[in-house]
Amino acid sequence: MPSWLMAEPRPVPFRGGGFAPRPRRWVGWAVFAALIALAEIGTRTGFISALTLPRPSDVLLTFGELYRSGLLWKHLLPSLSRLAVGALIGASAGIGIGILIGLFSLIRAGLVPLVAAIFPIPKIALLPLFVIWFGIDEGSKYALIAFGTFTPTVVSTFGAVDNVDRTLIRMGQSFGLSWLSIVRKIVLPGALPGILSGLRVSLAIAIILLVAAEMLGAEYGVGAYILEAGSLYDLERLFAGVTILSLLGLGVSAVIGVAERWLLRWRH
Amino acid sequence: MELRLEHVSHRYGATEVLRDVSLTVPEGRILCVVGPSGCGKSTLLRLMGGLERPDAGAILQTGDPPEGCLNPLTFVFQDFALLPWRSVAGNVSLVLEDRPLGRRARQAIIADVLERTRLGDFARAWPRQLSGGMKQRVAIARALAVRPAVMLLDEPLSALDAQTRELLMEDLVALWSREPFTAVYVTHNLAEAVRLGHAIAVMSRRPGRLREMIEIDRPLEAREVGDVELEARQRELWLLMREEARAADAELVDG
Ligand SMILES: Nc1ncnc2c1ncn2[C@@H]1O[C@H](COP(=O)(O)OP(=O)(O)OP(=O)(O)O)[C@@H](O)[C@H]1O
Ligand SMILES: [Mg+2]
């Protein structure tokens, strides 16, 4: 008698699945909530001393005070406008030049080494230079943020253009489309996913540089607020400021998410 | 319009791909090109369509393209080459937008070719929503929209399963019967070649030369699956190609 007749049938063990990210909205919030709850309980029970970590509820109170006194907007609005102007200049220049690099071999040969040389420079180190060039006021801050956003945007943009499916471009040529049509209707939409995901990184860098610029000479701004709180070892205010930055980051990321869902609706 | 190749040779670096190919694509007929893999069929098609220049020889067009022709030499690609960010109608529209056509005329052409390829109900669908067969029908609709003088099809059905392929062959025959077009149809499926070809050019392995030109007189509409005469022609083709295919298969790709 063959052995399979006597043996008990067993289900085939499952070993597929995984490696496919699926949206799990609440998990992110749960992690935040758990960490904050942990800090709150720790500081209340004395397990964490008040010197090492402020109590989250105190941070919230400080935040409420900041809001009521009107100081919140006084700090936030200049920061937002610096971020908007600087990132807009940097990202549009980066996307523009990135596309040119992607399209023209001569420009690529000329600029790629330059970009590679500029990329690793910590842009904050150049702030004194920007102060001389663009003035101590807003100009140098715009320049710092713009410059810092520019390099990563260039790199991700020309990478995205390089990755556009060549067979689609050949198709366009074979139907006699004009060069401009091929760029507008095939290359740019094809590069858009890569450009947008590059922007996520660039804009996070823009926020970092915003704070750096404001720490080095600004009366108002989230960076100035954090610097002041830090020098007084006022941890509640320090954390209130840091929370604003985190929220700013979440906001920027949400805006890009909305743009992606709308511009790339052909994907899902 | 007729397409004529005279002593065409081509090479990529050290690889000689085509050697002294001469042939004619008569107006209103479908010429199938078969040959072992890597023998230069796609290269031949790209040369015919002006996407590349031959190293030697000439590619000539005689006669005028038909009335209202927008793009005389028009490709249909194996992988469809549809823009995923445009709807079905948008993909057809793409190839008309650079032409001096009014909005009305453009809409009329789009509606007409989608109707002819039975895609009328899917005008607003995204490519990702379509099956492979439907995608290729969109690509065929797009090619028809520019009223080509010669259609250049590079293994248009190779990415599809056998049943879908059969259906699309019937579609192509119906399209041709309704309005005969000139076409060069590259394939390595001999059944497709005997179903769709008025003539079949058999190529040798690389460097590709024209080995034999086979004519099939039976009208396209009268050809059916399991037709005895066609099966005989297909066997004849296979015997011609067999040794070449075996030798080509044993070669190193960059050898
Ligand atoms: N752009 C290119 N640069 C260099 N070599 C190429 C290029 N295109 C094709 N070749 C080479 O030329 C030869 C013929 O290629 P081609 O694609 O024309 O063959 P084919 O008959 O269409 O093959 P298949 O049946 O695989 O589609 C191959 O050896 C291929 O590697
Ligand atoms: Mg090929």
Image (cartoon, rainbow, N blue to C red):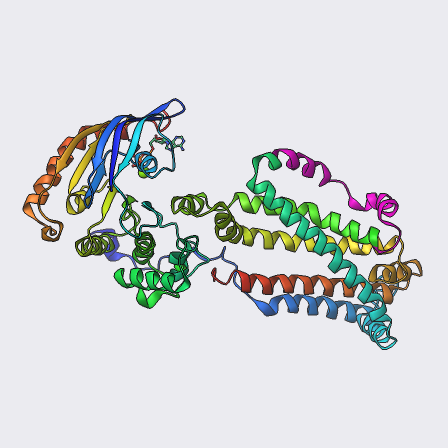
Residue reaching furthest bottom?
A: A68
Snapshot quadrant of residue A231: bottom right
Q: Residue at x 13, y 33 (%)?
A: B239
Prevailing secondary structure of the magenta residues: helix
Residue drawn at x 68%, y 62% as measured from the top left:
A252
Which image quarter is the N terminus of chain B in?
A: top left
Query: What segment is highlighted magenta in the picture?
Result: A109-138
Q: Residue furthest top?
A: B14
Asked where in the image residue A224 lies, by quadrant, the reply is: bottom right
Vertical arrangement, residue B134 with respect to residue B187, above or below: below
Residue found 84% across the figure and 56% down from its top: A138
Position of residue B110 measured from the top left corner of the image (x, y, whole percent): 34, 61
Which is nearer the eye, A206 or A88? A88
Q: In the image shown, does B46 or A44 lie closer to the viewer?
A: B46
Residue B113 position (above or below residue B218): below
> Picture coordinates of residue B104 (x, y %)?
38, 65
Instruction: State which quarter of the image contains the C terminus of chain B.
Output: top left
Residue A42 drawn at (x, y percent): 79, 68
Is residue B129 visible in the rendered image? The answer is no
Q: Quadrant of ligand 1?
A: top left
Is A243 situated left or right of B165 in this image?
right
- Position in image of residue A242 (x %, y %): 79, 62
Extreme right residue here?
A: A232
- Front residue of this view, candidates B154 and A234: B154
